[in-house]
Amino acid sequence: MVGSFKGILYPARLPTFHRVPAPESVTNLVQWFWIPEWDIEPGHTSRQHVIAFPTSNLVVQKDLVEFAGPTTRRSHRDLTGRGWAVGALLRPALVPRFTDDPGSLRDSQLPLPLADLHASVAEAMRGTDPRERRQRAVEAFTGWLVTQSPGVSEEGILANAMMDMIGTCADLTRMEDVAARLFVSPRTLQRVARKYIGLSPSALIRRRRCASVGRVAPVPAPFAACCSFVALTQATQMTPARSLREKAHQRTRRRASDICVGAVRARYEQAPANA
């Protein structure tokens, strides 16, 4: 299944990228698997720009396995030579399996000594048929997750539901609204977000609202955040947060201008006619 690379601003510059839906056995653990492959001409570099997205990934590469925490800023990666990666976009419920403090891994990666996972996925990626090797890699990844990960706890289910709700329900504009919809206290929601996501519920809501700037048509979440950001930054060279700040500054300047004009007009009208 060919899909768009989550966060990549210029997917056409990647030689190939495939997104594979998570098998039913791990839908509570993984949103989807993504597999880029590249073969860059010697002496050349392909820079891939990546936007912020509040989820974590488990990524198998040719020489290592790493856990990538939630991102809060735009970044890039320079691809050279020949390589591949098999990544799993994680659901919040699976995050504590790899770290008890995802917030400490914001915008960073943590290498993991998962030799068995690396060996099985790397073996699958040695295949000669592209479609078959990708499918085998996903099966190997999925099999490892099933054997290594325990069942999802009630708290993990709550974390998944919170992430889904914040990402899809535009009418939820406050943390208290989300907590009420999920029948838990705001304090519980904050604790779950800290443990399973690494960002506060309020930060997730702000990010969703920023992503809605410049949206001109409904787009299925969570891909909407990527589409909105790309459209806005490429058209205006301005990030959503910067756009919101600029609009606020414009309103402030207009109010100040109106006040000044009103004061001058009042003074003029009050002045003697023969002045």
Image (cartoon, helix red, strand yellow):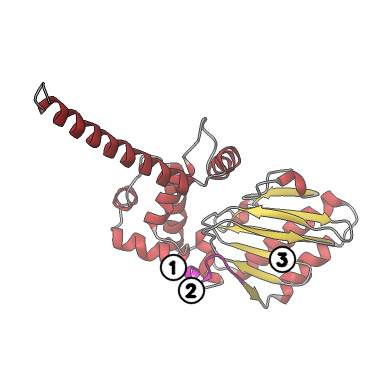
Whichever of callouts 3 and 1 sits on the residue coming sooner in the sequence is 3
Q: Label 2 sits on what residue type?
A: Asp
Judging depth in this view, the residue of 54 and 8 nearest the camera is 8
Q: Is residue 213 left or right of residue 6?
A: left
Residue at left 46%, top 61%?
156
| Residue 167 is at least partly visible in this image | no
Which region is colored magenta?
102-109
SS of the residue at dot 3?
Answer: strand
Cα distance between the residues tagged 3 and 2: 21 Å
Which amino acid type is marked by label 3?
Answer: Val
x, y percent for residue 149: 58, 68
What mark, if any, has residue 60 been given in the picture? 3
Label 1: which residue? 195
Q: Nearer the viewer, residue 250 or 269?
A: 269
Q: Position of residue 51 (x, y in %)?
A: 59, 52
Q: Residue at x 55, y 70 (%)?
A: 97
Residue 206 among magenta residues: no
Marks 1 and 2 close (CB-CB < 8 Å): yes
Give the residue pinned by disc 2.
100
The answer to which of 215 and 32 lies nearer the viewer is 215
Residue drawn at (50%, 36%) of the image: 214
First in sequence: mark 1 vs mark 2? 2
Vertical arrangement, residue 172 with respect to residue 57, above or below: above
Q: Quadrant of the C terminus?
A: top left
Residue 202 place in picture, x, y as percent: 37, 55
Element assignment for label 1:
helix
Identity of the residue furthest to the front in this view: 274
**Kind of residue at disc 1:** Lys
> Of label 3 and label 2, which has the lower sequence position?
3
